[in-house]
Image (cartoon, rainbow, N blue to C red):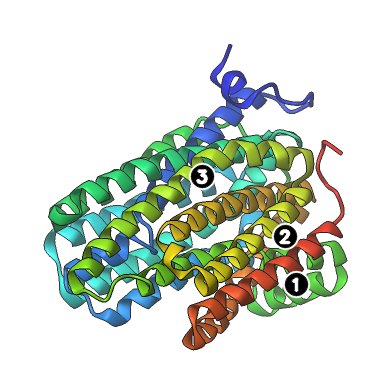
């Protein structure tokens, strides 16, 4: 029995060739890429390193927006160029190798720079990594749609999430054990390992057998790109509703950082206790996130192949309930926050893993060919903008108090769940 059949199961009957082989290479390739994503984390690893080498404080708030929005905003502009290619796999490989090279730049910067110089180099490398990530994100949806049938794509994506969860646990353990002795040289080794993971991903992707298609000659001018975004949002109600639902699903993406802040706020006022609790808490949160991905990946993949919209609905409701419970604990049983917040972080991470797998499966299943590419590119560009807006609004609410931000996100999640119920079913299983 092949690796694909043992791990991913029997694929549905289809006319697509080489499905088990392509699925194994795709899932292992993205699993390897997720290793790099977990190590080069704008929420944990990079801030820790840059703080340790004396980079200016103003650099830290820029890391997450550059990493997240930077990988989504360019996609509508990249789409016309992508559609001119008969095969999308080579562009996916370019994006993969480009991310590995950006990681090597970070590793070298960790060895030879510090302070402002290190901060500026890391921002530039992170911006490059995000741009290459945008190319991979866009091209991979087409490659997956061309090489795997409906009813199998969720399992493939879910397995990659499981792999990333296992790696996160390992990285979290290493950081927890070595936090007192982390040096720039050790960080450079970590960044080097991340680079190697992307190079391994490149090798795995290169063995995927993608059928060619007829290239589409499209205009790449800015006015055409903007006009296409406006036209798609206005004319395509299913797509417009999907973008609205996905926007409201940010509840699981934005709330974890507020849980960490709440943990810090609830720590003892003693300086030494804060230091030790902060380090221990961060290690515990990293492990919780990894365990969530490990457990939720394959399950959410199978559920998404049955009904990706129902998976989205259930995960959003679950996340909102967890946030509501967190607010109740903070208001009524503040002494219990020490054990509740890591548990809440784990539960939210489970919901986030399910939402990521389900939304990816949904957008790949809802269209074929160039329309799918159009959906993915426009949706991700809009999400890049929406992420900046929602992130800014929740940050403003957090000035009034962290619980206000969590309450707003819980409310948005419930609205998102209500809207997700009304999405058309596009999955094979129903």
- How far separated are the C-alphas under marks 2 and 1? 9 Å
In the image, what residue occupies the spot 79% across and 72% down?
233
* Res 374 label: 2
Q: Nearer the viewer, mark 1 or mark 3?
A: 3
Q: Which residue is mark 3?
A: 293
Given contact means CB atoms under 8 Å apart, are the residues at marks 2 and 1 in contact? yes
Closest to the camera, between mark 2 and mark 3, is 3
Mark 3 Cα-neighbour bin, 10 Å: few <14, some 14–19, many ≥20 = many
Image spot of residue 415 (x, y percent): 76, 69
Contact (CB < 8 A) between labels 1 and 3?
no
Instruction: Bin the neighbour count of mark 1 within 10 Å (Cα to Cα): few under 14, some 14-19, many 20 and up.
Output: some
Q: Is residue 379 left or right of residue 111?
A: right
Closer to the camera, 138 or 114? 114
Residue 42 percent across, percent down from the top left = 38, 63
Which image quadrant: the N terminus? top right
* Res. 220 in view: no
Q: Residue at x 46, y 33 (%)?
A: 204
Determine the CA span between mark 2 and mark 3: 29 Å
Residue 27 in percent (x, y) is at 54, 35
In this picture, residue 112 sits left or right of residue 254: left
Please name the residue that numbered disc 1 is placed on.
228
Give the mark count: 3
**Residue 359 in the image: above or below residue 413:** above
Q: Find residue 355 and name its label.
A: none
- Label 2 residue SS: helix
């Amino acid at each position: 029995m092949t690796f694909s059949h043992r791990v991913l199961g029997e694929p549905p009957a289809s006319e697509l060739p080489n499905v088990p082989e392509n699925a194994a290479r795709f899932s292992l390739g993205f699993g390897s890429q997720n290793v790099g994503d977990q190590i080069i984390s704008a929420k944990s690893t990079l801030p820790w390193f840059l703080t340790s080498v004396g980079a200016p404080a103003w650099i830290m708030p820029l890391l997450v927006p550059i990493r997240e929005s930077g990988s989504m905003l360019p996609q509508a502009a990249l789409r016309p160029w992508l559609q001119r290619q008969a095969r999308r796999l080579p562009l996916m490989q370019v994006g993969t190798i480009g991310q590995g090279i950006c990681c090597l730049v970070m590793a070298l910067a960790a060895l030879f720079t510090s302070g402002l110089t290190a901060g500026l180099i890391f921002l530039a490398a992170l911006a490059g990594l995000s741009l290459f990530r945008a190319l991979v994100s866009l091209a991979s949806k087409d490659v997956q749609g061309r090489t795997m049938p409906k009813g199998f794509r969720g399992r493939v994506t879910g397995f990659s999430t499981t792999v990333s969860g296992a790696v996160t646990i390992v990285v979290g353990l290493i950081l927890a054990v070595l936090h007192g002795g982390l040096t720039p040289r050790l960080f450079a080794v970590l960044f080097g390992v991340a680079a190697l993971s992307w190079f391994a991903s490149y090798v795995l992707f290169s063995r995927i057998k993608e059928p060619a298609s007829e290239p589409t000659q499209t205009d790449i001018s800015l006015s055409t790109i903007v006009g296409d975004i406006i036209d798609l949002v206005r004319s395509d109600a299913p797509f417009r509703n999907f973008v609205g639902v996905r926007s409201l699903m940010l509840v699981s993406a934005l709330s974890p950082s507020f849980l960490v802040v709440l943990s810090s706020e609830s720590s003892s006022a003693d300086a030494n206790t804060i230091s030790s609790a902060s380090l221990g808490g961060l290690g515990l949160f990293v492990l919780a996130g990894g365990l969530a991905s490990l457990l939720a990946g394959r399950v959410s993949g199978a559920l998404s192949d049955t009904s990706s919209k129902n998976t989205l609905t259930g995960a959003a409701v679950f996340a909102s309930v967890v946030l509501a419970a967190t607010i109740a604990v903070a208001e009524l049983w503040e002494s219990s926050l020490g054990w509740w917040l890591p548990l809440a972080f784990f539960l939210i991470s489970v919901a986030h893993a399910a939402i990521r797998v389900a939304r990816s499966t949904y957008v790949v299943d809802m269209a074929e060919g160039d329309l799918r590419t159009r959906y993915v590119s426009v949706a991700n560009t809009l999400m890049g903008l929406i992420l900046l807006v929602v992130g800014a609004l929740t940050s403003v609410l957090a000035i009034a108090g962290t619980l206000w931000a969590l309450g707003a996100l819980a409310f948005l999640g419930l609205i998102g769940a209500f809207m997700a119920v009304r999405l058309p079913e596009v999955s094979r299983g129903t």
